[in-house]
Image (cartoon, grey):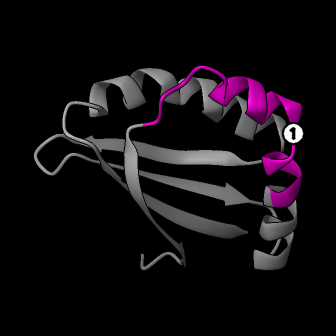
Amino acid sequence: MAVQLRRYEVEKGGLGRLVEWFPTIAAVRDQYGFTIEGAYADEENSEFVWIVSYPGDVDAFESAVESYNESPERAAAFDGFDSPVSKMHLSYVSSAL
């Protein structure tokens, strides 16, 4: 299983809007075979951190991301959403436990 850690720097005042909208995009990710392992709002640092996994290796994850990114469901989820994300930090991680 491939696991990706996603850390978003969020514009001041935008974290609540992102947290409220997140289940919308999480549902789309689910439709494309991804599993949201966890999601956390760091209000002190105005960051949103989440972990998403996909069966298989990193190549399978990346292939699924391509399909997901091009999907009409993803486009619909972003339609009308003014994203407060100013910067994304993405990395593949493995369990340390």
Q: Could you say which is closer to the camera, residue 85 or residue 36? A: 85
Does residue 33 appear in the picture of this structure?
no
Left or right for 94, reference 86: right
User: Over which residues does the magenta segment extend?
Assistant: 66-83
Kindly identify the amino acid type of the residue bearing the numbered disc 1.
Ser
Left or right for 4, reference 6: right
- Residue holding disc 1: 71
- In this view, the residue farthest toward the left is 44
Q: Quadrant of the C terminus?
A: bottom left
Name which quarter of the figure residue 17 lies in. top left
Left or right for 4, reference 71: left
Q: Could you say which is closer to the camera, residue 65 or residue 36? A: 65
Residue 53 in the image, given as x and y percentages of width and height: 66, 58
Q: Quadrant of the N terminus?
A: bottom right
Q: Would you place residue 18 above or below residue 2 in this image?
A: above
Residue occupying image coordinates x 75% and y 77%? 58
Please tell me whether residue 80 belongs to the stretch shown in magenta. Answer: yes
Residue 74 in the image, given as x and y percentages of width and height: 75, 34
Q: Would you place residue 90 above or below residue 30 in this image?
A: below
